[in-house]
Image: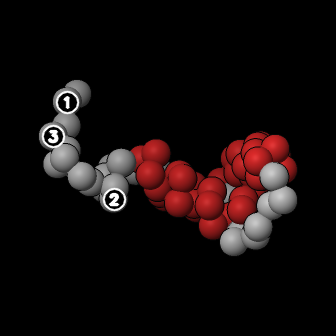
Amino acid sequence: MELFLPSYSPNLNLIERLRKFMKKKALRGKHYPDFATSLGAIDDGLNRVHTDHRETLASLMTLK
């Protein structure tokens, strides 16, 4: 199935929705002292997202 997307459509781009969600839930506006620590926080968030936020994530990952 092919969908037409405008050249800039962050609301229709599923990865942009996931990025925004992870920024809000995993990073939580915190400042991390180095890149490795911030990657660790993102990794932990991605490992927990499918269990802790299953319903929210399911509603975000639709094309509606």
For badge 1, the amino acid type reads Glu
Tell me the residue at 63%/56% (across/down).
22
What's the CA distance linking mark 3 and mark 1? 7 Å
Residue 36 in sight from this viewpoint:
yes
Circle nearer the viewer, 2 or 1 = 2
Tell me if mark 2 has few (under 14), some (14-19) or many (20+) residues whose alpha carbon lies within 10 angstroms of its own.
few
Name the foreground residue: 19 vs 62.
Answer: 19
Is 23 situated above or below 45? Answer: below
Name the foreground residue: 41 vs 63.
Answer: 41
Q: Looking at the picture, how far across and down is residue 57, in whole percent? A: 57, 55
In the drawing, does residue 43 fall left or right of residue 13? right
Secondary structure under badge 1? loop
Q: Looking at the picture, how far across and down is residue 46, in whole percent? A: 71, 45
In the drawing, does residue 4 fall left or right of residue 39? left
For badge 2, the amino acid type reads Asn
Q: Which numbered disc covers residue 2?
A: 1
What's the CA distance linking mark 2 and mark 1? 17 Å
Q: Looking at the picture, how far across and down is residue 7, in whole percent? A: 19, 46
Colouring scheme, one of rainbow, by chain, secondary structure, one colour: secondary structure
Tell me the residue at 54%/53% (across/down).
19
Q: Looking at the picture, how far across and down is residue 4, in whole percent? A: 15, 40
Q: Which numbered disc covers residue 35?
A: none
Point out the tag, 2 or 1, that comes first from the N-terminus: 1
Name the foreground residue: 64 vs 26.
Answer: 26
Q: Which residue is mark 3?
A: 4
Quarter residue 9 falls in: bottom left
In the drawing, does residue 29 fall left or right of residue 32? left
Secondary structure under badge 2? loop
Q: Which residue is mark 2?
A: 11
The reply to whether callout 2 and callout 1 are in contact (CB within 8 Å) is no
